[in-house]
Amino acid sequence: MRPRQFPAVQDPYAALRYPEYRNYIVAAFFFSVALLIQEVSLGYELYSMTRDPLALGLTGLAQAVPFIALSLFGGHVADRSSKRKVILWSMRIITVSSIALHLFARAEASGWWTAPPILVGVIYTSVFIIGTCRAFQSPASSALRAFLVPPSVYENAATWSSSAWQAGSIIGPAIGGFLFAWLGFSDTLLVVVGLLVLSTLLYSRIGDRRGPERGSGVDLAKSVKEGIRFVWQTKPILYAISLDLFSVLFGGVVAILPIYAQDILRVGAEGLGILRAAPAVGAVLTLVLLSRISPMRHAWRNLLIAIAGFGISILVFAVSPWMMMSVAALFFSGAFDSVSVVIRQTLLQLRTPDEMRGRVMAVNGIFVSSSNELGAFESGVAARLMGVVPSAVFGGVMTLAIAGWVSLKTREWMKTRLDIPG
């Protein structure tokens, strides 16, 4: 395959000229805001009830287990079913789960019972349900994006999609922290439900997109193996998503931010919202720049620099005793991460055939979930065993080591001016 050349300057609004794509990214924005408000409030409530770092890590595990177990099947379904219907059913179930969580939280807050362990169990159950639904929603949504715009604007679409998610990552945690402080846990979940309903309505305005007709006798195991084999044989995709997996798996500190907010920086729920929003602020500002200047020239070099920058940012955050320094470090971690996200998503969109998008996106989703949700579990376990600050330092060092090892193994890829070798 002849590598695609990328202009230094591009039309920053190319993807937004397509109405269905606009509905798509606004829906993604509301969805990310809803999930992140809920994640912040769940994390703060759990740590307040348990005072145990492992309790925070277990939320990541509860979401990662069903997501990883079912994602390949979800990708198979996305390739052979209506992507729109898969998304809408997933959104409805997530919404119902959030309503149930609100009702249990309100009952506990109102004194109808005094059994915090029951509420903890309901929280983990809700997170498990969200992970299950995302195993279907995520590959269907990622695959759908490629059908809403032409290939010539895939990179721009990847940038705007990342911008929508990251904008939600700014507003969601910030609002979540303040809503939790002002309204309490149960009423914050009502806001989550409203945003999920808005997102579902916007997804419903996108036309149907079905997979190729292959009959009812398609072998599931063979279909899943095709997706795994494609990723394994396409080395640039494999290396890119593996870099993201290990850097965030070890370097991610999101799960232990409630501990930093309460016990180290002592800034409370409002401060937690600011800490959670800081990486997304850095990401969005960087994505605005990337919508005008392509990172795909010397893409592999840029990817490795971004991963190394992420690791350095985490190291600074780990040892910072001051709120402003911590916020700045998290800001730069988001900025560097956004570069790697755009390169990875563009690569996936360009190199994946239409009939395999759901399965390939499912494999990518497994890597992303492993880095985020399992990374949250790893953070909780490491914080309990090593202490909070040493565990964060360890994560930053491991990220730098991984970036260095990969740069040595693929150093010939950085000598070319092409987009991505392979």
Image: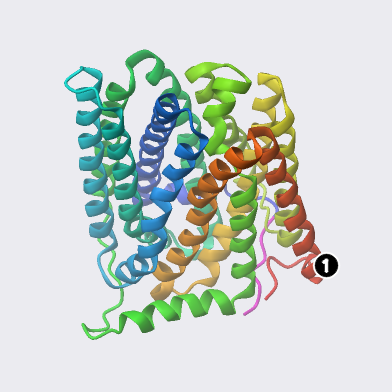
Residue 212 is situated, as x and y percent measured from the top left of the image, at 30, 77
Residue drawn at x 69%, y 32% as measured from the top left: 317
Residue at the far left: name it. Answer: 112
Q: Residue at x 38, y 19 (%)?
A: 179
Q: Residue at x 55, y 28 (%)?
A: 259
Indicate the position of residue 227 as horizontal and vertical percent values.
Answer: 45, 76
Residue at 76 percent across and 51 percent down: it is 400
Residue most extreme to the top: 182
Query: Which secondary structure lies at badge 1?
Result: helix
The answer to which of 188 and 414 lies nearer the viewer is 188
**Colour logic:** rainbow
Q: Is residue 164 magenta?
A: no
Q: Is residue 304 above or below residue 2?
A: above
* Relative horizontal placement of residue 310, taking residue 157 as reference (left or right): right
From the viewer's perspective, tell me whether residue 37 is left or right of residue 386.
left
Foreground residue, 320 or 387? 387
Residue nearest the observer in this picture, 188 or 278: 188
Up the image or down, 375 lies above or below 355; here it is above
Is residue 319 visible in the rendered structure shown here?
A: yes
Instruction: Tell me which segment is drawn in magenta.
Output: 1-7
The amino acid at mark 1 is Lys
Q: Is 5 included in the stretch rendered in magenta?
A: yes
Could you say where residue 182 lies in the image, as x and y percent from the top left? 37, 13
Q: Which residue is mark 1?
A: 415
Residue 292 vs residue 81: left or right?
A: right
Quadrant location of the C terminus in the rendered image: bottom right
Residue 222 position (above or below residue 10): below
